[in-house]
Amino acid sequence: MNSKTITFLILSVILLISYPCIGEEDEIGLTDNPENIDNTDIPGSIDDLINQTDQINPDIPYNSGSVEYQDNMINLGNTDGLENTGYMSVSEITNTTDTGQDLTSGNMSMPIEPARQSDLIFTTDISINGSITPKQAEMGFPFSAGIEIVNSGPANAQDITINYYLVPFNETDAKPIWIHQKTAKEIPAFYRDTVFFTVTMPGGIKAGQYNLYTTLTTSTPDRDQANNQYISDSPIDVRRSTSSSLYDPADLLVTIDGISSSVTGPGYPFTINYTLFNVGSGSSGTFRIGFYLSQDEVISPSDLKLWDEIYYKSYPGMAEKGTAVDIIPEEIPQGEYFLGAIADFTHMVSEADEENNTFCFDTPVTILAVSPPVNESFLDRVSGYVAVKTNLYRQYRGLTNLSFDAELGDIARAHSIDMAERGYFAHETPEDIDPSDRAKNAGFDVTKRLSDGSIRTGIAENIVKIAGGHIIGKGFSGFVDPSDPQAVADVMMVEWISSPVHDKNLVNPDIDKIGVGVSYNGEFFYGTQNFY
């Protein structure tokens, strides 16, 4: 993973919900993997399976019978002008920094009354699982480190505070030295990421080896506070500076080397290939590169912002190539523009030359008022891909194919449309009509005799809600092209397969029919998968 990472103002979250057949639901509405399904030692690659296209004809009209599934992804946006010295995939991050403040205790945890079993859905289990530290650092100079944060859920963690300390290595009863703090309003459930920061190593401390000690607190009831602190495995060798504490400055430059297309429109993906340079004699900490559309060749932060990329550090002689891809914002008016880039547009780095940070690409970019990429035909293709990939997955798991049922497809599609139009995301409608009741109301016979002679009543359901662009999910984190129906279907399938309760529906040996329906409200794709 290179040094640059995209940050976003709104965090992408995936919510997966499955609905088992009647008689298979436990107390909290979730199901476990069937006992006769072995999830271990499966040969081959799930990614290879999901990306198969040679057996798929996306033009088959699966809207008459498809798979219905649900998963919730919230789109990631870009952070405009957020001046923090570190990175966290959460919204509205603020930082404070100090040097050399001694604290008598590094444990910032607050006692929280244990949650009752019925209240567990309102609790979180947020933890620090590891750290990345440099081997050495110089007093008076910046250094970067990171910690891995995991929120095991089921609730989002609110009002997060992370404090960083240095603890003398192998010294009993040594007082931790506070060096940095990050705060965030929320970290979503099922989040996992490495959070980096850059801070100046305090002067005036004793040279030697120090461990990075990190504590984390949240206002949300936390089931296990013992994992809210972490001491790095390896110490940092802190040395006194051999030169002036006023380190040599960096000098950042950026060029745009190519683009995916000179003609595009709102809602469509756009790729920018660029190169970042540091031609100065010193390193730098965190900064951002902003990409803009301008009416003239003078690029400035007041132009139309596309998005930005974040870097945690730069070094002398750096010439690193990068790719920035995202969706053209809907608010960009049609017209012809100059495409530009600005290195360190928030002025977070003190540079040798602050006037050479902008670049204007030589090929104009035309924004057209084109039709949105998503229409009924597009949604039918998504449904078709999902249906076919479901059978590919069942073949991979040694199971028989499901037949596409037109009635189940209509039931699935109607629920997806209802969720998209009324803005809810659940198996039950606001009127508390569940999947089996919806099937009955549509005239579908929900009673089924199994091979062992037993009778089963009801249908099973998976649902998903996903936005295009940059997303963070349980099974997939990355860029989803909302103009590519197969890309949308792939993410839906990966998320279901990555979730045991949804995977159970996919590999249920007692089902033989499937219906799929997908809808779109201009922001989110809603998918429903019904099984019988």
Image (cartoon, rainbow, N blue to C red):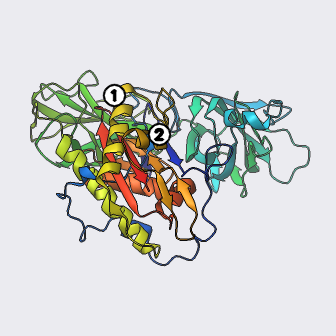
Who comes first in sequence, dot 1 or dot 2?
Answer: 1
- The total of numbered circles placed on residues is 2
Toward the viewer: 184 or 321?
Answer: 184
Circle 1 or circle 2, nearest the eye: 2
Report crowding for label 1: few under 14, some 14 to 19, many 20 or more residues within 10 A (C-alpha): few
Residue 474 vertical placement versus 497 (above, below): above
Instruction: Name the quarter where the N terminus is drawn.
Output: bottom left
Residue 161 screen position, x and y as percent = 67, 30
Residue 284 visible in this rendered orientation of the protein: no
**Element assignment for label 2:** helix
Q: Is residue 263 left or right of residue 354?
A: left
Q: Residue at x 46, y 76 (%)?
A: 398
Q: Residue at x 45, y 76 (%)?
A: 44
Residue that badge 2 annotates = 437
Q: Is residue 249 left or right of residue 191?
A: left
Report the amino acid beneath label 2.
Asp
Q: Is residue 57 left or right of residue 3?
A: left
Residue 166 screen position, x and y as percent = 74, 42
Residue 301 screen position, x and y as percent = 29, 25
Residue 231 screen position, x and y as percent = 75, 49
Q: Is residue 364 left or right of residue 404?
A: left
Residue most toward the right? 173
Toward the viewer: 295 or 396?
Answer: 396
